[in-house]
Image (cartoon, rainbow, N blue to C red):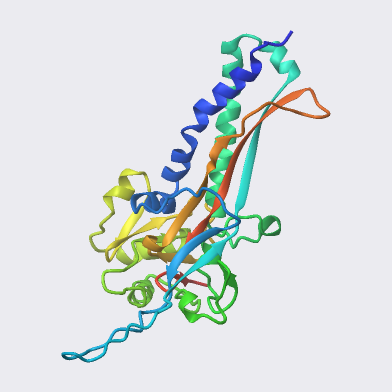
Amino acid sequence: MANPNISEIVTSAIENRTKRLADNVTHNNALLMKLEKRGKIRTVDGGTAINQELSYAENSTYKRYSGYEVLNVSPSDVITSAQYAWKQAAVAVTISGLEQLQNSGSEKMIDLLESRIMVAESTMRNNISADLHSDGTADDGKQINGLRALVSGNPNAGIVGGINRAIWNFWRNVAPAAEALTSDNIKGKMQATWVQLVRGTDKPDLILADNALYTTYWSAVQAQERFVNKDMANAGFENIQFNSAPVVLDGGVGGSIPANHMYFLNCDYLHWRPHKDRNFRTLPGDRQAVNQDALIRLIVWAGNLTMSNASLQGVLRGN
């Protein structure tokens, strides 16, 4: 007969591995790693949507005065919030009844599960990373609102976080028209994009580039001394410094960043918001397949990538 403690063995093996999954996802993605360092990864307790507070206007009561002159104390509505829908993802680890019989010893069962859990973790990690570059439309809009949605090449249209960009210009990112980028002109185009994203001490702190634009920038600075960001380099991310921000190769083999895209991100205003009970957690309880002799465990995630300021984000595109 199958091991009577199979449920406990499966649960223990999966939970021991998935405790590390959230960290693995974060540390294998340049954007999430930067958000973690900025303290912009914060879990959500619940609610019908994920609310992200943002400031969209200056306080209108500022007034220069003298002596007893009456001051402006009128209420100033400068804070609102964007609302982001919950997005969910899951991956299943299964074991058949026959496999339970064939691997009835606890050590054998753990050995069998180990490889399947590793594949499940890799699948979840890779797909979450891909979704971070998405426009959020896959699977009928069930996908994470990735950078293609938040930092759009067409920032004058579309609804992001419930706010219509066609109406509200404060909610539009910087996006110069796509043009041919070469090693001769890319630094100038990058600088022209950069200066539109600086507000006092606010400035881009992460630049993500696909293979083509990373190579173009690398060629542009090849003849001079190149600096790298040590934090990114120590974490294993290929990068070259531009002004005060690292330009990170976010393409490579199997990369998901759109072709000919270079994102200029201010990570103070980007937020990774997983639900506290679905942050790469294993759902509790036995799940027996209805019409199969198999035991199933689900690793689940729920949340979204949110943004609290669009005007300080940018995207440079080649063609």
| Quarter of the figure with residue 24 | top left
In this view, 304 is above or below 183: above
- In the rendered picture of this protein, how many numbered marks are placed on residues? 0
Q: Which residue is drawn at 31% across and 69% down?
A: 202
Q: Which residue is drawn at 55% across and 31% down?
A: 118
Residue 164 picture location, percent across and down: 57, 76
Q: Nearer the viewer, residue 247 or 185?
A: 247
Q: Quadrant of the N terminus?
A: top right
| Quarter of the figure with residue 215 | bottom left
- Which residue occupies the extreme right position in the image? 291
In this view, 252 is above or below 112: below
Q: Is residue 127 visible?
A: no
| Quarter of the figure with residue 243 | bottom left
Does residue 170 appear left or right of residue 38 in this picture? right
Does residue 28 appear left or right of residue 10 in this picture? left
Residue 86 picture location, percent across and down: 60, 54
Q: Which residue is drawn at 71% across and 58% down?
A: 140
Q: Residue at x 36, y 77 (%)?
A: 196
Q: Which of 110 and 213 is in front in this view?
A: 110
Q: Can residue 125 be seen in this view?
A: yes
